[in-house]
Image (cartoon, rainbow, N blue to C red):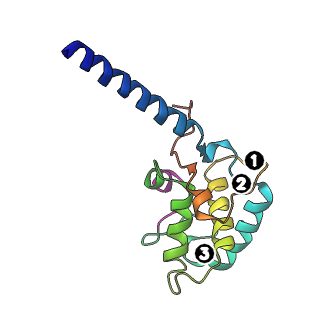
């Protein structure tokens, strides 16, 4: 009886694990071309108009304002999604008037930030829909480059 119970539990665990792997494989990554170059170009313009005065023209930040390019940003969002980056920008920026930028503008800014951090462009824009953005995983390091 114990052997049968163990076999059932083991089989259930394997099936559950395969479901997790399947779910993860259907999620894109920022490294899979999650935005277009045209979208990032719009984001660069929007960044210049709304973000550069605090975060710097090259996303470098300063002593009090975090950089939006480099290890700090990448590690901060590691394991989250592109939607989490967009949500953070949407709800906290610009600092003097948070939440005033449209979702489309914030999404474009996020793609410029992704581009500036080495994530490649693809053939499809990152949608302005938060549920679609949550399907794009954010990994600090490009898979296979460790």
Q: Mark number for residue 51?
A: 3
39 is higher (above) or lower (below) than 91: above
Q: Residue furthest bottom?
A: 97
Residue placed at 56% from the left, 34% from the top?
A: 143
> Looking at the image, can residue 68 be seen?
no
Residue nearer the viewer, 131 or 107: 131
| Residue 61 point in image, percent of width and height | 52, 67
SS at badge 3: loop
Give yes or no for contact between labels 3 and 1 (Cβ–Cβ under 8 Å): no
Residues rendered magenta in the picture = 66-74
Q: Position of residue 122 (x, y in %)?
A: 75, 47
* Nearer-N-terminus badge (3/2): 2
Mark 2 surroundings within 10 Å by alpha-carbon count, few (fewer than 14), some (14 through 19), many (20 or more): many
Nearer to us: label 3 or label 1: 1
* Residue bearing mark 1: 122
Residue 65 appears at what percent x and percent y?
A: 46, 71
Is 72 positioned to the left or the right of 122 in the image? left
Q: Label 2 near label 1: C-beta < 8 Å? A: yes
Q: Is residue 128 above or below residue 51?
A: above
Q: CA distance from mark 3 to mark 2?
A: 20 Å
Snapshot quadrant of residue 110: bottom right
Distance, label 1 to label 2, CA atoms, is 6 Å
Instruction: Name the residue located 53 percent from the left edge and 39 percent from the top edge.
Output: 23
Which residue in the structure is indicated by mark 2?
A: 35
Does 144 sit above or below residue 40?
above
Residue 12 lies, in percent from the top left, at: 37, 27
Magenta-span inclusion, residue 87: no
Name the quarter where the N terminus is drawn: top left
Is residue 72 one of those drawn in magenta?
Answer: yes
Callout 3–callout 2 Cβ contact below 8 Å? no
Precedes in sequence: disc 1 or disc 2: 2
Which residue is rendered at x = 65% and y = 78% of the image? 102
């Amino acid at each position: 009886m114990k052997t049968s119970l163990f076999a059932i539990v083991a089989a259930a665990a394997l099936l559950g694990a395969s479901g997790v792997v399947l779910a993860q494989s259907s999620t894109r990554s920022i490294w899979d071309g999650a935005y277009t170059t045209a979208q990032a170009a719009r984001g660069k313009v929007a960044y210049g108009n709304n973000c550069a005065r605090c975060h710097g023209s090259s996303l470098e930040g300063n002593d009090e304002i975090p950089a939006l390019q480099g290890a700090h940003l990448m590690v901060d969002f590691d394991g989250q999604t592109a939607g989490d980056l967009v949500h953070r920008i949407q709800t906290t920026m610009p600092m003097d008037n948070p939440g005033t930028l449209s979702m489309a503008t914030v999404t474009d800014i996020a793609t410029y930030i992704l581009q500036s951090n080495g994530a490649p462009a693809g053939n499809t824009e990152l949608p302005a829909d938060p549920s679609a953005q949550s399907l794009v995983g954010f990994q600090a390091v490009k898979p296979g480059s460790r």
